[in-house]
Amino acid sequence: MADSTKAEVLHDLFPFLRIFKDGSVERLMGTDTVPPSLDPKTGVESKDVVYSAETGQSVRVYLPKIETPNKKLPLLVYFHGGGFCIETAFSPTYHNYLNTLVSESRIVAVSVDYRRAPEHPLPAAYDDSWTALKWVASHSNGNGPEDWLNRLADLGNVYFAGDSAGGNIAYHMGMRYGREKLEGVEISGIVFIHPYFWGSEPIGSEANEVLRRSFVEKIWRFSYPKTSGCDDPWINPVADPNIAGLGCTRVLVCVGEKDLLRDRGWLYYEKLKESGWVGAVEIIESKEEDHVFHLINPSCENAEIMLKKIVSFFNQDKA
């Protein structure tokens, strides 16, 4: 019977999702979405725009309340988290966060939605994110498909940011930009928020977290079945001999004291400093906080401190 077949679980990745033997996927979180809007709290306006006719994927573009018409503003390209397999750019969590970030920073933002595992295993998310960046670059001469970007986005002052898996994506987009560039686009800096970096050998407090380590590795292998493992440069940036090739001159790494990924963030910070990369890297650690706490409890004191730090990072180069 079809029902009994569906009841057989092939992969149980609770609390993220379950995969059944009939191929169906049950996402257990990150499934809610909200439409673009004019946010009454912040005055930030948003719209959804298709960036890939081939896949049908969209970005959500955010515009702060405009005080000086036609003045170009820095552009943020944001990559959402969710282990490459849950959440979207349209979830209330990310929509609310981008509204706040755009309002506080007074920047234009493009939040990228990408295809997810298991229906579309990695490198699909990386490929989609690069396609989205090429779509952004198509506005560099002021004649791209989206008017907001043509009129108001300064493509000579672009930032990448992302949390968790999105931080991993932001890293790889920065590395690819370092290799290939994008005509008309200059990357000023990248913010890695609790980035999903890993490795086969435990470091720091990881040795005491056997079950949590196992889950982190399970998600990675599930999302990227063709990976070479946990020292694959796609998940372990310090295993990449070209680590100094990051295509920007400023980096901010955010970690949480109680986050299992904390030590990986610190390791990346140290190795980037030692690599010969020509740039300035900063790190901020949120005491007593766990993974993506700022999305779970955005009004807490540590979330507000981290927000101010990120806003300051984006505003540093403003005229």
Image: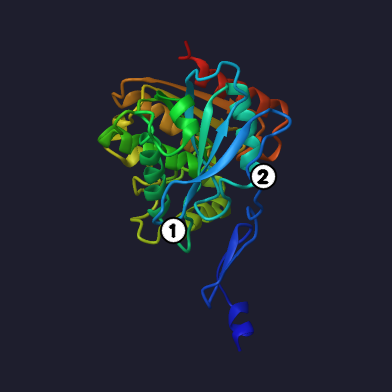
Q: Position of residue 7 (x, y in %)?
A: 63, 78
Indicate the amino acid at tag 2. Pro
Q: Quadrant of the N terminus?
A: bottom right
Can residue 84 be seen? yes
> Label 1: which residue?
221
Can residue 252 be seen? no
Q: Earlier in the sequence, mark 2 or mark 1?
A: 2
* Res. 64 image quadrant: top right
Query: In the image shown, does 186 or 86 lie closer to the viewer?
Result: 186
Inter-mark Cα distance, 2 to 1:
28 Å
Query: In the image shown, does 234 or 89 lie closer to the viewer?
Result: 89
Q: Residue at x 40, y 49 (%)?
A: 128
Q: Position of residue 216 (x, y in %)?
A: 51, 52
Residue 65 horizontal side relative to residue 60, left or right:
right
> Label 2: which residue?
92
Q: Residue at x 65, y 43 (%)?
A: 93
Q: Which mark is residue 105?
A: none
Q: Residue at x 43, y 46 (%)?
A: 51
Dot 1 lies on which element?
Answer: helix
Q: Residue at x 49, y 58 (%)?
A: 218
Dot 2 lies on which element?
Answer: helix
Q: Position of residue 107 (x, y in %)?
A: 54, 25
Residue 304 horizontal side relative to residue 231, left or right:
right
Indicate the amino acid at tag 1. Arg
Q: Are marks 2 and 1 in contact (CB under 8 Å)?
A: no
